[in-house]
Amino acid sequence: MNETIKTILFYWIEKDLPIIRKRSIDLRKYLGMESRKIVVITGFRRAGKTFLVYDLIKHLLKDHSREEVIYINFNDERIPPRTEFLSEIMPVFRSTFEKDIKFLFMDEIQEMPDWSKWLRRINDNEDIQIFVTGSSSKVSSREIPTELRGRALEVELFPLSFREFLVFQDISIDPKDIQHRKREFALLMKKLDEYLTYGGLPEVVQASLALKTDILQDYYRTIVAADIIERFHVQNEVALKAMMTLLINSTRYSVSKLCNTLKSQGHVIGKSTLINYIEYIKTSYYMFTLNIHSRKVKDSMQYPRKPYFIDNGFITALSTRYGKDMGRSYENCVAVEILRRGYRERMFYWGDDRGWEVDFVLMSDDRVDKLVQVCYDLNHPDTRDREIRALLKASRELNCSNLVIINKDIDRVETHRNKKIDIIPLWRFLMEE
């Protein structure tokens, strides 16, 4: 055990750090916090958590030696999944190096037994600032173990935003008056289409067009195998995969309909198992769902839920629908961006019994803060009328006058029945600070 720890530590000391692309999240602001908290970076696997940490490490190494800034990746196959490994890290370090650890970075530590108890002990008894990353919600604020409550600060990392996507492709575009600069605007629209099609996972963004879909499908297989089947010991793998196929091809679902469809396909599965499977998928950050906005819990449970996926690329790579559904691409992209802006527990959709619907209801405390409708093409009169009427109906029912429609190309404010509606193109919404 001791020799394995030494090998990993020496490997880190000698390791060259890769070239880092800057993200909008900067971990430097968490350095030297007055209250000692473990900084936990969560999010979908391959979204860039490790590189975000490397960026901070590079900054720290300007003033500290490698022995003072230690990084351990628990996905390393040499590390045994045993509590003893964690217990021996500090003693082995002290017997090997002369300097004390000042910053400790632990990548995917949630796979180790008793990891949270060990982290609490180190945080409480050592003068070390700890950063932890994880691609499972086991380390998130939603599932964080009891011993770390009040001791951890969560930072959620998403796939690249559209602004970050442009930076990763070395494209600098000033959104002010861009519509009047034809060449720049054409490039922006081309890149937006690429972003909507293949998403914002860093490796995919930088891959050749021929490899993008293959990489996304490989990520998907890893999610299913490692983050769902292995972690939760799923027995009915065939039914799980069939259900995930149904979800990626659906804009809404109910447990009853999913269950009936799976049974019609020959799968033996009950509703409680199906509910568990959906929760397993959500813990991997691959999918999130929206409930209908209602003060009645019964309504929230009875109405269908809307599934969204953490990256648009998965819809392209995995959907079995023929052709490109721009409406769905727009809506999924907006959903992820709203989530990125901090509305995880405060985002719903609105609908009534007559079929009128608004895509996103955004809450602030107990009141509705904003209503957002997403429509790819507003130029057809019938489509335009339907989207505006739904928004106005929801506005009256929910007592909200902050109304937005996100679309392909219209950019203006309109007034309907004495209510202003801000109609903005998707590219402008995504380029907002």
Image: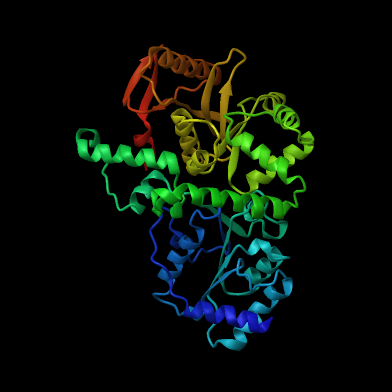
Q: Is residue 342 left or right of residue 377?
A: right
Residue 246 appears in which quarter of the rendering?
A: top right
Above or below, comparing residue 336 to residue 400 in the picture: below
Q: Residue at x 73, y 65 (%)?
A: 114
Q: Is residue 158 left or right of residue 272?
A: left
Q: How is the image coloured?
A: rainbow
The foreground one among 259 and 66 is: 259
Above or below, comparing residue 65 to residue 311 in the picture: below
The foreground one among 248 and 296 is: 248
Q: Specify whether residue 68 is in view.
A: no
Query: In the rendering, at what x and y percent does residue 17 appear?
Result: 43, 71
Query: In the rendering, at what x and y percent does residue 61 appear?
Result: 42, 74
Query: In the rendering, at what x and y percent does residue 294 appear?
Result: 63, 25
Number of marks in the rendered image: 0
Query: The N terminus appears in which quarter of the rendering?
Result: bottom right
Query: The C terminus appears in which quarter of the rendering?
Result: top left
Query: In the rendering, at what x and y percent does residue 216 appear?
Result: 51, 48
The foreground one among 297 and 318 is: 318
Q: Is residue 13 left or right of residue 264?
A: left
The foreground one among 338 and 220 is: 220
Q: Specify whether residue 374 is in view.
A: yes
Q: Residue at x 64, y 74 (%)?
A: 78
